[in-house]
Image (cartoon, rainbow, N blue to C red):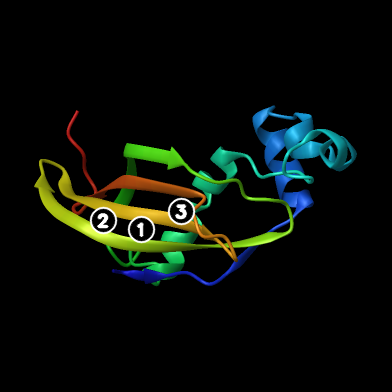
Amino acid sequence: MLGTSAWYGIDQHRIDGFAQLTDDEEPLHNDPDWCRTNSPFGRPIAHGFLTLSLLTRFISEITGNALVGTVEKSGFPLNYGFDRIRFISPVPEGSRIRCHATLLARDGHKDGDMLRFLVSIEVEGVEKPALTAEWLTLWVADGRISA
């Protein structure tokens, strides 16, 4: 295992901001009054894609920013995508989450190294993870990619 991030709070302000940025505003995420009477969760839940988008923040923390391009090194990371994403349990507003990451493989690629991570997001006090995914990142070592 590479490591585990610190706990990170998910509040209504963050959920509402994500909804505004992505034009994904709906009562399940953005209307606490509606959720109290209509949602099985009793309060808003974070968008699955909000939780997924925080993986970049978490992997940077876990790796000590080792996968961040800088002016001191010629390489940089490219998000290559996912082979598998599963949203398993909700992230209720007011909860804390953290990420567990494992480097599954580092393989050669024509443009650098392909890194395959197994990541999961844990919700504090919840047995099942919020999400699990196999995430691919291409490290472009010499700063150039082929067309």
Residue 47 versus residue 58 in the image, above or below: above
Which residue is found at the position 59% from the left and 65% from the top? 124
Amino acid type assigned to the residue bearing label 1 in the image: Gly
Instruction: Name the front one of labels 2 and 3.
Output: 3
Which residue is found at the position 84% from the left and 37% from the top? 31
Q: Mark 3: few, some, or many residues within 10 Å (few <14, many ≥20)?
A: few
Residue 12 shown left or right of residue 1 in the figure:
right
Residue 63 falls in which quadrant of the image? bottom left
Residue 54 shown left or right of residue 21 in the figure:
left
Residue 24 versus residue 143 in the image, above or below: above
Q: Secondary structure at mark 2?
A: loop
Which residue is found at the position 32% from the left and 67% from the top? 72
Label 3, on which residue?
Answer: 56
Check the image and name the residue furthest to the right. Answer: 33
Residue 48 versus residue 128 in the image, above or below: above
Amino acid type assigned to the residue bearing label 2 in the image: Gly
* Distance of label 1 from label 2 (alpha carbons): 6 Å
Q: Mark 1: few, some, or many residues within 10 Å (few <14, many ≥20)?
A: some
- Asked whether 125 or 5 is in front, the reply is 125
Label 1, on which residue?
Answer: 69
What quarter of the picture does the C terminus occupy?
Answer: top left
Question: Residue 123 in the image: x percent, y percent?
Answer: 57, 59
Amino acid type assigned to the residue bearing label 3 in the image: Thr
Instruction: Name the front one of labels 1 and 3.
Output: 3
